[in-house]
Image (spheres, rainbow, N blue to C red):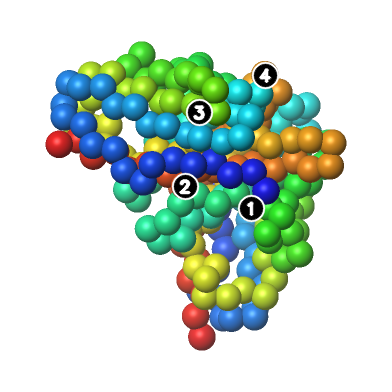
Amino acid sequence: SYVLTQPPSVSVAPGQTARITCGGSNIGSKGVHWYQQKPGQAPVPVVYDNSDRPSGIPERFSGSKSGNTATLTISRVEAGDEADYYCQVWDSSSDHHYVVFGGGTKLTVL
Amino acid sequence: QITLKESGPTLVKPTQTLTLTCTFSGFSLSTAGVGVGWIRQPPGKALEWLAIIYWNDDRRYSPSLKSRLTITKDTSKNHVVLKTTNMDPVDTATYFCAHSIVSSSSWYFDYWGQGVLVTVSS
């Protein structure tokens, strides 16, 4: 089955840029979505379809892809950005159709 | 405004069947391009996708849990039900339901319920 690999943790100082990666085979052909989850809360989408932002999500959140890696970039990081972040794809072929989540990355704001 | 809410038992015994209901509002599951999925999260661990049902009654399951899961919908009641058989302590998790839409041929979850913590213990 398809696997998405994320680093367990990323640390960044306030005001700096955080980059969270999501690796997967042939990920360039798939739409990648990113979710933010704060403790005790449900996930919230922050980027969908690789680089689009849902309404209400700050422009500081952006997504990109290169090769077999997708990246969520958070510019000018704030204390309130501290959370777990998950990437997700829809893995579909002629014989299967699965939703796949990455293992999650804990963003710590120093 | 789209809202979803999970309901069901918070404690089940090993080998029992868990039945969870997702009650939603603000959309119809008979509208093309809409789905409702279930995702769970064991305490302190990552999200795990379980199942999804689409407006056309197409149903997909996690390959690792497929034999134990059944997802159904009742469009008239705005309900989606997930049954999981043969529950085990490792199935202890918060279970979320979520509204799903397709963007550029890739489905994602744009609205989530608050989740319900289900503990499996004798």
- Decide: few, some or many residues near mark 4? Use Cα within 10 Å; few <14, some 14-19, many ≥20: few
* Residue position for label 2: A103
| Picture coordinates of residue B44, whole percent (x, y) | 37, 58
Mark 1, residue position? B50
Answer with the quarter of the image where residue B58 lies.
top right
Which residue does the numbered mark 4 point to in the structure image? Answer: B104
Give the spatial CA distance, label 3 vs label 4: 19 Å
What SS does tag 2 mark? Answer: loop
Residue at x 74%, y 27% (from the top left corner): B33
Q: Check disc 3 and report its element: helix, strand or loop.
A: strand
Mark 1 or mark 3, which is nearer to you?
3
- Contact between marks 3 and 2 (CB within 8 A): the answer is no
Kind of residue at disc 1: Leu
* Chain letter of disc 1 in the image: B
Query: Given this view, does label 3 or label 4 mark the residue nearer the observer?
Result: 3
Residue under label 3:
A69
Q: Say whether residue B58 is visible.
A: yes
Residue type pointed to by label 3: Thr
